[in-house]
Amino acid sequence: MANEEKLLNLVNVVGEAKDRDEWDQTFWSPKASENHGCGTAMCAAGWQCAIGGLEFTGFASVLVNDEPVYVSSYATEALGLTENQAYWLFKTNFYNDYDLFVETVKKIINGEIE
């Protein structure tokens, strides 16, 4: 079951990152965005990993218990999402549309996306 508290926290963190130009749904991690600009932008899944205090080890991985794990896999589990919910939340089709991101979170919380 999706963790509403963590999802709402993620909405706030992404909103703050957006205001600093550090939210970009096309990059999993800061390492991925290094070659394309500032090196600080990342997607919602990347921000969930940052919230968890994880170390980014590559373009799409973080260290969990000294083992590399895909950013999306960690974020999916941390947020209690189904694979379908993760698809809708982490897909790049937002084109950095924060309102659409927030609407998707609301739909997950309300059970409209299972």
Image: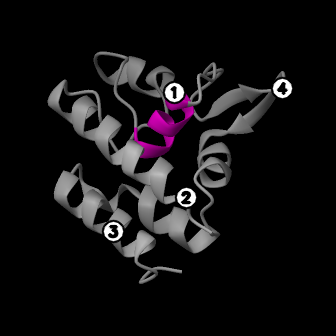
Q: Nearer the viewer, mark 3 or mark 1?
A: 3
Residue tagged 4 = 65
- Answer above or below: position of 95 versus 48: below
- Tell me if 81 is positioned left or right of 35 in this view: right
Q: Tell me which amino acid carries mark 3.
A: Lys
Instruction: Say few, some or many: other residues with alpha carbon within 10 Å of mark 2 (under 14 / 14 to 19 / 20 or more).
Output: some
**Is 113 located above or below residue 64 in the figure?**
below
Mark with earlier residue (2, 3): 2
Q: Earlier in the sequence, mark 4 or mark 3?
A: 4
> Circle 4 sits in a helix, a strand or a loop, which is it?
loop
Residue 112: quadrant of the picture: bottom left
Q: Which residue is mark 2?
A: 3
Residue picked out by circle 3: 106
Q: Amino acid at mark 1?
A: Ala
Using the image as rendered, state which of residue 108 and residue 56 is in the foreground: 108
Secondary structure mostly taken by the magenta-highlighted segment of the chain: helix
* Number of dots carrying numbers: 4
Which secondary structure, mark 3?
A: helix
First-in-chain label (3 vs 1): 1
Residue 63 colored magenta? Answer: no
Q: What span is in magenta?
A: 43-51
Separation of disc 4 and disc 1 at Cα?
Answer: 15 Å
> Please, what secondary structure does the residue beneath circle 1 have?
helix
Q: Amino acid at mark 2?
A: Asn
User: Does residue 19 show up?
Assistant: yes
